[in-house]
Image (cartoon, rainbow, N blue to C red):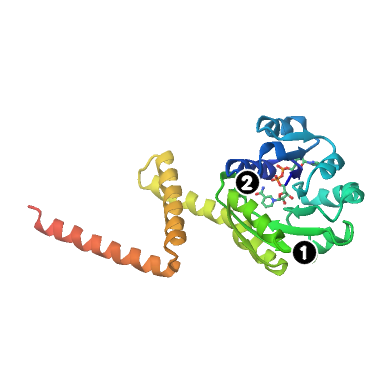
Amino acid sequence: MSVGFIGAGRMAQALSRGFISKGIVKPQKMMASDQSESILDFMKKQGVSTTNCNIELVERCDLVVMAVKPHLVADVLQEISDFFTTDKMFVSIAAGVPLEVLETNLPEETRVLRAMPNTACLVHAGATVIAPGKFVRNGDASLVQKLFQTVGLCYVGTEDQLDAVTGLSGSGPAYAFATIESLADGGVKMGLPRDMATKLAAQTLFGAAKMVLESGKHPGQANEEQKSEEMKMEKVEKKVKMSSPQ
Ligand code: NAD
């Protein structure tokens, strides 16, 4: 299967790196189109073919990923629509562009899916939900899921879940960044160097997230266990203080 990215920016680069590193799609089977030569250089370095022509990409690829900014989607759809055939698959990662808009602007019965990834795909720790359109065939959604799993966690859901997904995992990194900053500020206030405080804060969130994911425990249960560990530590500290000479 050949995969093409219309728009070779940050998300397309992260996805292509994921596909290649996990051996799901070979670079020779990938193509990227963009108007910016400097952006395409990154793809060229990975061995991905590049073009400035979206129509050429559509003609040469079995699965086309729409990775331009949402306000450009309508123009690109108009440009490529006549060259799209129903043996191809179309995946849009453009935030907020509904399946209906994509399906009505592509030929009848085009196999369309929407994906809502998040920025952590850039470091292969993303969280994505994909929503299949009405013309997808058996196996299409699981194939696209497999592709997005190369850059993190990926669920197959429904389009009516995507607003909630956008609020949770799409915008979620912003809350985590604010939490890291606040924890680090607290550390700095208590005398830690800024760099150490930031890394300790980030690693703490990373570790807590990993524990929830790996143990499958409810975060509330993990929190209770953490509290009881802290109480044990306090008791030990008190004993040590009482037994040490004045
Ligand atoms: P980006 O700006 O890094 O990349 C977009 C690329 O599209 C640019 O390189 C631009 O030159 C190119 N482009 C513009 N017009 C074009 C055209 N007519 N034909 C071909 N290429 C064209 O943006 P990004 O962050 O990679 O986001 C891409 C899409 O992913 C957006 O629709 C966004 O909503 C979605 N998305 C991004 C994130 C994120 O964290 N970055 C998360 C979820 C969804």
**How far across and down, in percent of the image, does residue 31 sit?**
75, 39
**How far across and down, in percent of the image, does residue 149 sit?**
59, 53
Q: Residue at x 49, y 54 (%)?
A: 179
Q: Which residue is mark 1?
A: 133
Q: Which of the two discs, 2 and 1, sits closer to the camera?
A: 2
Element assignment for label 2: loop
Residue 220's disc is: none
**How far across and down, in percent of the image, does residue 123 sit?**
56, 44
Residue 97, visible in the rendered structure? no
Element assignment for label 1: loop
Q: Nearer the viewer, residue 103 or 193?
A: 103
Q: Nearer the viewer, residue 59 or 72?
A: 59
Q: Residue furthest right?
A: 82
Q: Amino acid at mark 2?
A: Ile
> How many marks overall?
2
Q: Residue at x 79, y 59 (%)?
A: 111
Question: Which image quarter: residue 37?
Answer: top right
Q: Nearer the viewer, residue 132 or 37?
A: 132
Q: Is residue 43 left or right of residue 71?
A: left
Q: Which residue is mark 2?
A: 24
Q: Residue furthest left?
A: 245
Q: Residue at x 43, y 69 (%)?
A: 220
Question: Which image quarter: residue 137?
Answer: bottom right
Which of the two labelled residues, at mark 2 and mark 1, occupies the earlier sequence position?
2
**How far across and down, in percent of the image, does residue 233 sit?**
24, 60
Q: Amino acid at mark 1?
A: Gly
Q: Is residue 20 left or right of residue 245?
A: right
